[in-house]
Amino acid sequence: MLYPLQHRGDGAFQYPANVVEEIAAAIRVILTTIPGEHPRLPEFGNHAALVVFRNPGPDLEAMIAGLVKYDIESWEPRAKVEEVTATYDYESASYRVRVLWSAPEAGLRETRETEVTLGGGV
């Protein structure tokens, strides 16, 4: 079976329709995988997920943004990360991470946005 798969919403899975969707799916997989979850690639994943429970602040937001950018560019070299912002939400005790990316070599020059929530729960 090839990866990444997309969930269709009706309980079934499908392969991405084109290269840009494949890159978007790969970014979502990177952002939602904690390092160590993949037994054959223990370094694979979003290393920011390992630091989100430290005391919140601007320095940690910058660290999370840097880790997200590094992990995406390391594991999905077709993606060019334009900007990453990490904002702590005190209500949910989580970080909202927004990634703006493009894929010039795949023909995507305009930026696309992917968001993920890290941490949460008390």
Image: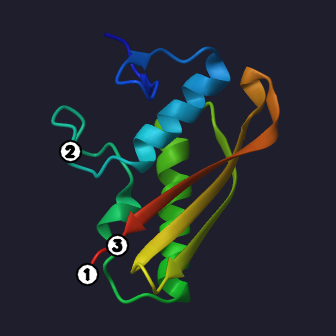
Q: Earlier in the sequence, mark 2 or mark 3?
A: 2
Residue in front for this viewpoint, 122 or 52? 122
Q: Which numbered tag is attached to residue 120? A: 3
Q: Position of residue 24 (x, y in %)?
A: 58, 34
Residue 116's x, y, as percent? 50, 56
For disc 2, the marked residue is 37
Q: Residue at x 28, y 46 (%)?
A: 43
Question: How crowded is the residue under tag 1: few (<14 C-alpha within 10 Å), some, or many (20+)?
Answer: few
Element type where label 2 sits in the image: loop
Residue reaching furthest to the right = 110
Instruction: Give amino acid for label 3.
Output: Gly
Residue at horizontal 69%, vertical 45%? 101
Q: Residue 115 appears at what percent x and percent y?
A: 57, 54
Q: Crowding near pointer 3: few (<14 within 10 Å), some, many (20+)?
A: some
Question: Residue 62's x, y, as percent?
Answer: 56, 76
Please say if 4 is above or below 17.
below
Dot 1: element: loop
Pointer 2 with pointer 1, Cβ within 8 A: no
Camera-nearest label, 2 or 1: 1
Q: Amino acid at mark 2?
A: Glu
Q: How far separated are the C-alphas under marks 3 and 1?
A: 7 Å
Residue at image location 78% in from the left, 43% down from the top: 111
Query: Helix, strand, or loop for circle 3?
Result: loop
